[in-house]
Image (tube, coloured by chain):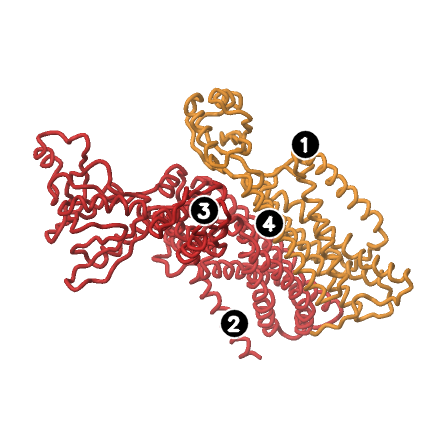
Chain colours: A red, B orange
Amino acid sequence: MKKNLNGKIAIIFGVLLVCLYGIFGLPKGVTGAALQAAITERIHLGLDLRGGAHLILQVVVNDAVNAETDNTVARIQQDLPVAKITFGSVLKPDPAMPQMIRILGADPAKSGDVRNELSNRYGAEYDVTGGGPDGTWTLTMKPTQLTDLQTRTVDQTIDTIRDRVDKLGVSEPVIQKYGLGENQILVELPGVDDPDRVRDIIQSTSRLEVHEVAGNSAGYASEQEALTSLGGAVPPDQMLLHGDSQGLASDGQDHIFLVKRVSIVGGKDFRDASAIAANDTGRQGVNFVLTNNGGERFYDYTSAHIGSYMAIVLGDRVKNVAVIKGAIRDNGQIEGQFSKEQIDALSFTLRTGALPASLVEKEVRTVGPSLGADSIKQGVIAAIAGMLAVMAFMLFYYRGSGINADLALFLNLVILLGFMGFSHATLTLPGIAGVILTIGMGVDSNVLIFERIREEIRAGKGPAQAVDQGFAHAWITIVDTHVTTIVSAAILFMFGTGPVKGFAVTLVFGLLANLFTAVFVSRVIFDSHVNHKLAGQKLSI
Amino acid sequence: MELFRNVNVDWLGKKWYFLGFSLIFSVAGIISMGVHWAQIGSPVPLGVDFRGGTQVQVQFQNAPDVNGIRRATEAAGIKDAHIVAYDQAEKREMLISLPEQSDEVTVDAGRKQIVDALHASYNNPFTVRNVQAVGPTVGKQLEKQAGLATLYSLLGMLVYLWFRFELIYGVAAVVAVFHDTLITVGFFALTNQEISLTVIAAILTLVGYSMNDTIVVFDRIRENLRLTRREGLTDVVNRSINQTLSRTVLTSGLTFLTVLALYLFGGQVLHGFSFALVVGILIGTYSSIAVAAPMLVAYQDWRASKGKAAVLPAAKRTKA
């Protein structure tokens, strides 16, 4: 019996230590400031407590659908003449239905050819209908294709935003699909309290552009040098841009380039980019894909300017200067003596550089850091005041056994916070509500047990037996109350978002801690207490 | 020290008083919700997170006055601005709200308008403490989802109680919890306070608390029924309530203490939240004794009047 008890006490101290580690990690010191820093690193505070910005953004997926069908319209306009089919026009009849394309006035005599041509080329993505005497055909994007495109667009947007937010240096951002609305994104940025700045960065359409190089293709060492070579002034159709030095002599210095003001292709002309493996000459490169329209313009330009230099400009900075070796349509490569990391970075920026669709704000919520700090301070003061009052009362009402309850209550809070630290769950204002319910139920468990023990003592039982019976009876009730509440909290966690979820998290953790402290810890303390008692001594309860 | 030793109160004998009390508060709440419904289209004043619109909390360097701010916003062409002082006067904070914008593209435009207007024509330096701009559809989604989550969790509890006790116990507990929620929300309607997301968290807390309280009483009833099969259900229920009364009062009192601390020291942000809990804990405790337990007896009486066997609705055996 005694040995068994020692084992249990060891378990309790083990749990206590593990949970303290969960809360504090390994603090750098034991001063108040060091401990506080350790806590804030482990326990994540929600925006309502910490300050920050919370945005719900609607991705206008129709933008992406429009881009896709615009592209198809252009392809149809090219493909039909090649197949020797005459037609009136290709258009999109309904702005509210961007997934629909209509061909008017296609030669009715070649109805079969039209059907073959359209089905062969577009049948994988579109449902093809029509072919009456008026030669009207309708291509509608297949529903699976449409949802696929929408999902991809939202995912891409999330990636883009995440990339931008990471570049901002915001720690612990939340960027995810928002479950409640269709094609909506939830963005939470702790510590950012200026919504204007946030919005600018997230929604900016950072652009990749290709410009014609007007001056020295290797660039100039300074703006002064560039101006001198120009005879003092930049021509009106040209501009100076800063950029990385080029070629083998890469020295990491800033260089100045003179380029044409109007870009050859840019922004929405790019569809995709990817790193390509090193070719046989050992040079690495980035493969980029232009849209149909952009490819057309790029082809016209490059075929007329073989041997000229073009500058790849990203966000107003020249990333690369390349010589045009031949005509390029929609698929090209940027080659150079890049490192693998540089290519990854470049291709990544190319891919995430532009948002695939525009964004509409559905909800903007910002909490100033001072307000969050006030909420914490007041919440903590209130929680501590409440807990101290409860603890004092327990001591007063149950005397010796009150210590027991107070210890259990304290340990309960430590375990709850330890759980929060380990699981990286976020503590929010509603989460504090969960803590309060936990404290309430923790007290309740102790009260249930104590009242029961008193009843047993009143019925004439000795201390050891009274404790035993008291626990045995109260145990059923405690399990029922806790399981019921855990069931409901688990459901809230599964179906809820935001505040409802924050509440459910602390509640589940708190109740699990409660079951342990009230039933196991409290029992061990009682037993060790009873063991030390002399026969005939009364229990202090 | 001990309170309530050997209490012997005939709780069920007072059921008509309880019914009257519950009816008065429920009906008052429902009437008040009806009045709100007629006026603003929702049963209770909703916070900006549910209602949609823009709300800016501004802290001024010098004491602000509502009329000055109104002149400034009106000079900037802002209509329907709702301007109220927030928290205690010495904090110099104001809440400026705009109704829902019909054009969702400009969900954040309201904040800009307000801030610009204050900069332009209200000569009092300020900092923006908190901004909430919510499009109407987002609020609707949130409302629906919070409601559904609560409904599912109630169903989950009902099923668990059915499994552990009998169906009627589950039903009685859920009815009691519903009663508490109705009266608490009714209090918000009566006192014209806004229901925001944090208040929803408080209502969820009270649901958990009230359920806990009810189960403690039910557990005792079940235990007593197993011990004494001769006693009538009314006596058993009365005795069970009396036996657990000491615990009920202690727990409620202590939880109430915690919540009261929150209400008093928690500040304005937690005001609605702690108000819901202060009301909810009182009602939740009351309902376990005055609603849930009498329902068991009423169900038994109803079965008896139908001529069915007077099976005590707790006959299910439990382990341990």
Taking the image as shown, residue B75 lies to the left or right of residue A328, namely right
Q: Do labels 1 and 2 share a chain?
A: no
- Residue pointed to by mark 1: B39
Reply above or below: A400 against A191: below
The residue at 13%/36% (across/down) is: A223
Would residue A322 appear left or right of A387 to someone viewing this image? left
Image coordinates for residue B111, horizontal then vertical, percent:
46, 32
> Is residue B313 depicted above or below B92 in this figure?
below
Do tag 4 and tag 2 residues touch (Cβ < 8 Å)? no
- Give yes or no for contact between labels 1 and 3 (Cβ–Cβ under 8 Å): no
The quadrant where residue A5 appears = bottom right
How packed is label 2: few (under 14 Cα within 10 Å), some, or many (20 or more)? some
Q: In which quarter of the image is the N terminus of chain A?
A: bottom right
Residue closer to the observer: A174 or A285: A285
Does the residue at mark 1 contact the one at mark 2 (Cβ under 8 Å)? no
Give the CA separation, mark 4 to mark 2: 42 Å
Give the foreground label among 4 and 2. Answer: 4
For badge 1, the amino acid type reads: Gln
The numbered mark, 1 or 4, whose residue comes first in the sequence reads: 1
Q: Check contact, mark 1 vs mark 4: CB within 8 A.
A: no
Which amino acid type is shown beneath numbered disc 3?
Answer: Ile
Residue linked to disc 2: A9
Which residue bears the numbered disc 4? Answer: B146
Classify 10 Å Cα crowding around label 1: few (below 14), some (14-19), many (20 and above).
few
What kind of residue is marked 2? Answer: Ile
| Kind of residue at disc 4 | Ala
Q: Whole-Å distance between the Cαs marked 2 and 3?
A: 75 Å
- Mark 4 is surrounded, within 10 Å at the Cα level, by few (under 14), some (14 to 19) or many (20 or more) other residues, namely many
Q: Mark 4 falls within which chain?
A: B
Alpha-carbon span between mark 1 and mark 2: 62 Å
Residue A493 percent coordinates (x, y): 56, 57
Q: Tell me the quadrant of the picture where the C terminus of chain A can be found.
A: bottom right
